Amino acid sequence: MTSRFFAQGASDSEDESDYDEEIPEVQSSDIQNRYLPDASDEDEDTDTKRVIKPTKDKRFEEMTHTVEQMKNAMKINDWVSLQENFDKVNKQLEKVMRITEAVKPPTLYIKTLVMLEDFLNEALANKEAKKKMSPSNSKALNAMRQKLKKNNKLHEDDINKYREAPEVEDDNEADDDEEEESEFEDDVSIEDVTVVDMPVDEPADNRWETMKNKGEREMEKLLSKDPKEITWDWVNQKFKEIVAARGKKGTARFELVDQLTHLTKIAKTPAQKLEILFSVISAQFDVNPGLSGHMPIKVWKKCVLNMLTILDILVKYNNIVVDDTIEPDENESSKPADYDGKVRVWGNLVAFIERIDTEFFKSLQSIDPHTREYVERLRDEPMFLALAQNIQDYFERMGDFKAAAKVALRRVESIYYKPQEVYEAMRKLAELAEEDDENEEGEEENGPPSSFIVVPEVVPRKPNFPESGRAMMDLLVSLIYRNGDERTKARAMLCDIYHLSLMDNFGTARDLLLMSHLQDNIQHMDISTQILFNRTMAQLGLCAFRVGMITESHSCLSELYSGQRVRELLAQGVSQSRYHEKTPEQERMERRRQMPYHMHLNLELLEAVHLIGAMLLEVPNMAANSLEARRRVISKNFRRLLEISERQAFNAPPENVRDHVMAATRALTKGDFQTAFEVLNSLDVWRLLKNRDSIMDMVKARIKEEALRTYLFTYSSSYESLSLDQLAKMFDLSKALVHSIVSKMMINEELHASWDQPTQCIVFHEVQHSRLQSLAFQLTEKLSILAESNERAMESRTGGGGLDLSSRRRDNNQDYAGASGGGKWQDNMNYGQGRQGNRSGYGGRSSGQNGQPRDWSGQNRGGGYAGRAGSGNRGGMQMDGSSRMVNLNRGGRP
């Protein structure tokens, strides 16, 4: 081959012949040597064996190589290269210390720092050589001076020790290297090795070896330990070693849990077993370190069983006290089981039960609600309730009622949203459920046959539920009201109000909310409590609708729907706004606050209730204030939807909830109550109500009443008198009910008419205002606007805002609770507006509705600020319902 490329006189034919002869030989030799099993021994000399090389040795060699490069740079005074290598060696130091798990840096690094510092001082002292440096080299010298000065402060003690005795430090480093090499045979793992090819003479069949990692070897040592040699000191020492490895990089979390679990079986005293169990639970929590994921379900169940075992120990050995305010003392756990005095063990049962509840909540957030897995996960809830009940009973026996109140709150938050039917199903499930055998995975056969400390099952594994959910709620919230802190009491009260609303007990729920004044302080609480408040107000609005209190229902739901962010406020979805972009962190935080699917409120039902209530209030109001429709608005959201519907050239058949309500509104405005009811009755959301027939009868009756009021507001100016029989037949109402409605309208001065008793007719009157009366109207109007502006400015100055829902408790002159006469400014805004469009202009012009003059001498003005207490928040609508509901914002004021 050499002559073929370099010989001058060789011909082409000779080259081709040589080439043809050599090809088969090379291929045959290559095939035989590499792939044939019966290759000759001569060719085996070229085979290689894969030798394991520790990663820490590789990292140390890299650092050594970088230090050699720095020495070469010093010889030629190259500070640019020194600066680059200095940054490189610092990065390599981090890797070396992480792999070796060393506390202080190696001597090689300290020696390099001393060498650099001496060389830097020499370079700075030689000013002539510094002047001759290139600009880049001089710049690197100055930068290196700053970096080295800052870096050496971190290792000042080690540098001083090395300068005092450099030879001793080198000897110690050599001894440490020898110890590390000897320990490496036991500690090396597959993940921490690098494969290097080296020529050897051994056969190929023995080149691979199966190696166990560090955790498996540690577990084998624990299992192979002779039970006679196990002492308290040995268990305590192993416990310290395992706990010290927790959280370090490279430590397998599941193996750590298995090792600690095995230590609980060989613990020598109850206190030691309890101490190790606390560490087992903490290690199980570490299995899922992220905030977005959740603990594996099997690990969660094991964690619950470990907590029950802790309670068994605490109940059986009542001299053991768990306290998180003491300093951990290992000597406490050495006291035997027959010790008479108090044994204090560090731990926090409340924190553990709260973390377990949080992990259960997060798992429900993550699992697809439309799968079987979600239902199976919900079946684990009685297990948690049993644990919480046992911990609460333990705290009550110990006299720690404050901690018992916190645990009781977790139980309340697990059942407050459940109707009686769901509660009954959960109670039966808990009674029929057998002992959970998820954790009967066989222990290692080589381990000890049984635990040294045998703890029987003392506490019950099944929860004890009362007959009704209301009885359980009363029992728990009474404990929280007596012993809980402010946040615990507030959340318990909101859950109590929610549950009362779920039971259709609106009066009690409303009174509890007003007495608590939570609506005044909710904007200062945490976001999760604000979400609970929003859910409670939504359920309170649904309850008011179910019992027929339309005004109160709309008052509870109006502010929730004022910002078009219902999903976000109820934590049932993430809203997307084109005007406001959220950072990824904000989106993650919002998703972590979402409610599980089985706790959701049906948004279609909520929207239907809100819009129907707004329709029943707004249609008569628009008829009564036809000339001032924009000034007197009860529901801005409803008006906006109505304007959008009216602007459409064609009205298609209704498809969603909004379309149905808008179609019913158009029919109700014309007085066609039958069509309005049929459109609303066709909604599918009513099937979610258990007493649908009675609720729909109530809705139909209210539609008839509001149709009657709308008709009288609209056409009263066209009549001089109207028969009671005709109205009763027209709207399919009884004479007594028509008489009552019309009489209330007359009393509230919404309808300017009187009864002619002999003929059972309504005689309508015209109203004319004098010049003085019109001016009084103008003054009152302007004073009301001024007072309202002043109040809003005061709210903004004092920081009234801050909650997702608007801090102001009115929606264009409507109080948050729909109070009829609760506030001073509210009454003034209603002054003169609760009449039948009686002021179309100023300066004494007639309203054009009814022209009969009125005697104003009997009206109490109170300086223009009193108004009529019954003037009505509905603009001409009788407020018999809302007069019983005080303004939620000022509920405590007389």
Image: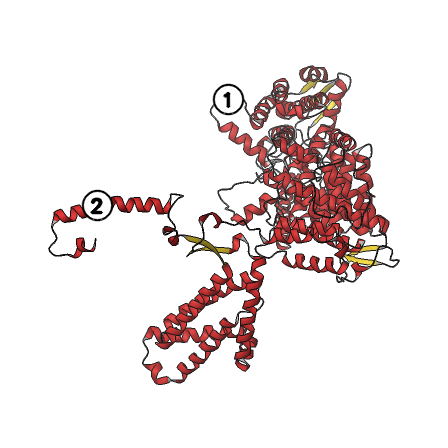
The crowd level at tag 1 (other Cα within 10 Å; few <14, some 14-19, many 20+) is: few
Q: Residue at x 49, y 44 (%)?
A: 579
Q: Name which residue type carries label 2.
A: Glu
Whether residue 874 is visible here, answered yes or no, is: no
| Percent of width and height locating residue 531 | 65, 43
Mark 2: secondary structure: helix
Count of numbered tags: 2
Horizontally, residue 290 falls left or right of residue 746, namely left
**In this orientation, which residue lies closer to the viewer: 671 or 201?**
201
Residue that badge 1 annotates: 652
**In this orientation, which residue lies closer to the viewer: 287 or 339?**
339
Horizontally, residue 29 falls left or right of residue 583, namely left
| Percent of width and height locating residue 101 | 57, 62
**In this orientation, which residue lies closer to the viewer: 609 or 777?**
609
Residue, far front: 41
Q: CA distance from mark 2 to mark 1?
A: 91 Å
Asked if 121 appears above or below 724 in the picture, the reply is: below
Q: Name which residue type carries label 1.
A: Ala
Asked if 387 appears above or below 758 in the picture, the reply is: below
Q: Quadrant of residue 228?
A: bottom right
| Percent of width and height locating residue 295 | 64, 44
Q: Quadrant of residue 785?
A: top right
Q: Residue at x 83, y 45 (%)?
A: 393
Mark 1: secondary structure: loop
Q: Which mark is residue 21?
A: 2
Q: Quadrant of residue 699?
A: top right
Mark 2 touching mark 1, by CB under 8 A?
no
| Percent of width and height locating residue 349 | 75, 51
**In this orientation, which residue lies closer to the viewer: 117 or 846?**
117
The numbered mark, 2 or 1, whose residue comes first in the sequence reads 2
Whether residue 808 is visible here, answered yes or no, is: yes
Residue, far right: 340
